[in-house]
Image: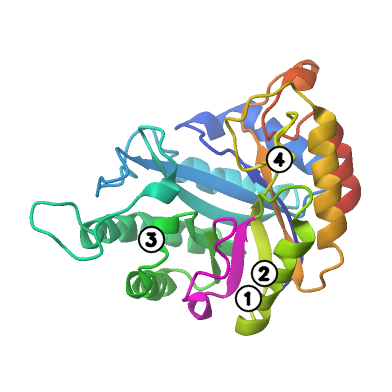
């Protein structure tokens, strides 16, 4: 697989946000400031609660098909290759990993079968778009940890996606879950979210390497990043962690991650988290404690590494 030096763009964008000149300029600056070779276009749809079985991907708040296609074409005009990543969020703020149902259907209770029916409609819609834009890679799911055990359903989703999209597919497992997914043989690329503490990279990469060796598939971190906040270098997955702004903590985490990963020849790339479609003023970067890269010390580290 070709090396992926990607940044995730536009997470949580609302309809029409990608139609603006500001969004196009943001993508241009992402390419210029990071030397990325790929962009991961993130499209978010929501379900109401972790036990809801309907995904509202047809809502008028979700990015329109036309703006996704237009942004993908603009990315190609900039020289970026496109990865399409539809994501399910929960409207009440619960992390999507906690979407869960009884293992066995119970009358009057929400069911995995109902949820997967809605999920399949959602993901097939974007599989068609991935085919239309000739996406380099299509991400069929992201951090849906409690669903990972539903092997039969995921194998059927993959089979259905392959009828609509002819390119390579991946599933973005969550951190620490790489060796728990039992259906990696069905996808083309193994990927996960690499939000690991600054001092644990070597041991986590050893564990992931065993999975890569077992399945003989390419691997990349579909998400990987750290907030610019003191303490986040130890818990980069905790987006709500309280602490003072620290660009140094973020930059040190990235340096540690890059140093560890570059020694692993089997690791085929990164999807850095993240880059907003609507940027804050660069003058405010010093006070931003989010995962964002724009205007921060870490941006130069990324640019040098991706060069």
**Frontmost residue, 153 versus 168:** 153
Q: Earlier in the sequence, mark 4 or mark 3?
A: 3
The residue that label 4 is drawn on is: 226
Which quarter of the figure has residue 204?
Answer: bottom right
Please provide percent x and percent y for residue 85.
Answer: 53, 53
Range of magenta residues: 174-193
Nearest to N terminus: mark 1 or mark 3: 3
In this rendering, the answer to whether 138 lies above or below 283 is below
Q: Residue 167: x, y in percent?
A: 55, 71
> In this view of the protein, can residue 296 be seen by the observer?
no
From mark 4 to mark 3, how far is it between C-alphas? 25 Å
Asked if marks 4 and 3 touch (Cβ < 8 Å), the reply is: no
Which residue sits furthest left? 107
Do residues under tags 2 and 1 come within 8 Å of each other at their CB atoms? yes
Q: Element type at marker 2? A: helix
Q: Is residue 47 left or right of residue 240?
A: left
Query: Judging from the image, what secondary structure is the residue with disc 3 in?
Result: helix
For disc 1, the marked residue is 211
- Earlier in the chain: of badge 3 and badge 2, it is 3
Disc 4 and disc 1: Cα gap in Å? 24 Å
The disc placed on residue 208 is 2
């Amino acid at each position: 697989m070709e090396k992926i030096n990607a940044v995730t763009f536009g997470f949580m964008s609302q309809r029409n946000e990608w139609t603006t000149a500001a969004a196009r300029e943001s993508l241009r600056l992402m390419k210029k400031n990071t030397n990325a070779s790929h962009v991961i276009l993130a499209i978010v749809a929501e379900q109401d609660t972790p036990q809801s079985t309907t995904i509202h991907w047809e809502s008028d708040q979700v990015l329109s098909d036309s703006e996704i296609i237009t942004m993908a074409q603009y990315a190609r005009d900039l020289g970026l290759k496109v990865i399409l990543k539809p994501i399910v969020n929960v409207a009440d703020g619960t992390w999507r990993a906690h979407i869960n149902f009884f293992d066995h259907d119970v009358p009057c209770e929400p069911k995995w079968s109902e949820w997967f029916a809605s999920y399949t409609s959602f993901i097939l819609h974007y599989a068609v778009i991935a085919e239309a834009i000739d996406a380099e890679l299509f991400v069929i799911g992201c951090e849906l940890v409690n669903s990972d055990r539903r092997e039969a359903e995921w194998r059927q989703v993959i089979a259905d996606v392959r009828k609509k999209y002819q390119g390579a597919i991946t599933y973005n497992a969550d951190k620490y879950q790489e060796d728990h997914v039992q259906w990696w043989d069905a996808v083309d690329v193994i990927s996960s979210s690499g939000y690991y503490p600054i001092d644990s990279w070597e041991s986590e990469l050893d564990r992931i390497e065993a999975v890569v060796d077992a399945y003989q598939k390419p691997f990349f971190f579909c998400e990987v990043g750290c907030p610019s906040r003191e303490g986040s270098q130890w818990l980069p997955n905790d987006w709500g962690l309280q602490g003072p702004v620290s660009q140094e903590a973020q930059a040190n985490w990235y340096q540690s991650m890059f140093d560890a990963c570059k020694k692993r020849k089997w690791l085929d790339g990164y999807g850095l988290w993240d880059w907003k479609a609507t940027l804050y003023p660069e003058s405010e970067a010093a006070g931003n404690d989010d995962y964002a890269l724009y205007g921060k010390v870490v941006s130069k580290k990324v640019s040098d590494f991706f060069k």
